[in-house]
Amino acid sequence: MDQGFFLLFAAVAVITALIVVLARNPVHSALALMACFLQISAVFVLLEAPLLAVVQIFVYVGAIMVLFLFVIMMIDVREAVLQRFLPGGNLPALVLLVLLGAEMLVLVLSSERFSATEPAAKGGGDQIREFSTTLFADYLLPFEVASVILLAALVGAIVLARKETG
Amino acid sequence: MVPLWWHISLGVALFVIGAAGVLLRRNILVVLMSLELLLNSVNINFIAFGRYYADFRGQIFAIFVIAITAAEVAVALGILVALVRNKSTLKVDDVTVMKG
């Protein structure tokens, strides 16, 4: 049952990811990316990380994709729609990608350490509570640093997108 | 149960597709979306390893990755809007201001 669901979600995720890269129109890319993020959040649910699945939907589908679509509507994409790839192709990059994918697949498939089928037993009980305790006790400093980074990004985005007034 | 290497393979597939988008596409918007794809494949790996080794740190680092991604997208789209306003181009090859 789990395997069937995982295969379904993974297949749709890979197909929509291909559409992201291959689509001519950036709007189609953005919509396919949204579908891909939804599939990935379903995979998170299968991995028993419901909090991450919700965060994925809120942040990626709710915020980032709206930002993308907003920017696509704001700037004129008609001229960019016409050209898909660089004429003449990019052979070194393609070779590099094939090598990268083959290397990673060989590493994953040939190693014994990736063959676990049953997850190690968890301490039962309230997983979200344990998770939050770990996040806010052991990782408090990185959490605060992340908030500072978000604030800096907010200010930076406002300054960058503002019209030049002097 | 789903074996661990299935998740890792999904991460590999999405990573390679995202890298293809970054390296082969010439449209800045699609390059940015492919970067999102790369970060998401890393998140899948983090959470899968975290589950199979019964460790919360995978999920915690995935949350940090999501936060950094949000910041990155905000700044990148701000830069993109400023770029389109000044140079009115969306092609990566046309942006050679910093080329020596």
Image (cartoon, grey):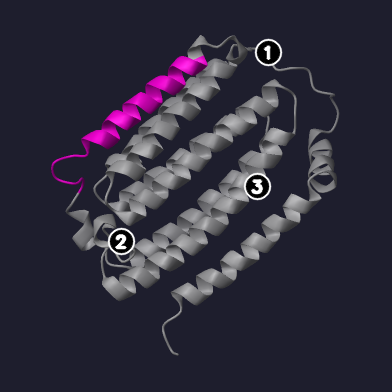
Residues under labels 1 and 3: Cα distance?
Answer: 27 Å
The magenta stretch spans which residues? Answer: A84-108
Q: Which residue is mark 2?
A: B99
Give, as a three-letter code, the residue at label 1. Glu
Secondary structure under the numbered disc 3 in the rendered image: helix
Q: Mark 3 — residue?
A: B64
The amino acid pointed to by label 2 is Lys
Q: Is residue A116 visible?
A: yes
Q: Earlier in the sequence, mark 2 or mark 3?
A: 3
In what element is the residue under mark 2?
loop
Q: Which residue: 38% across, 69% down?
A: B81
Q: Check disc 3 and give the amino acid type.
A: Phe
Residue under pointer 1: A118
Looking at the image, residue A2 sits to the left or right of residue B52; the answer is left
In this view, the residue in front, A40 or B31, is: B31
| Quadrant the N terminus of chain A occupies | top right
Mark 3 Cα shell of 10 Å, populated few (<14), some (14-19), many (≥20): some
Residue A48, how many percent across, how many down? 68, 29
Classed neighbour count for the residue bearing mark 2: other residues with Cα under 10 Å, few (<14), some (14–19), many (≥20) = few
State how many labels appear.
3
Please say if A33 is above or below A98.
Answer: below
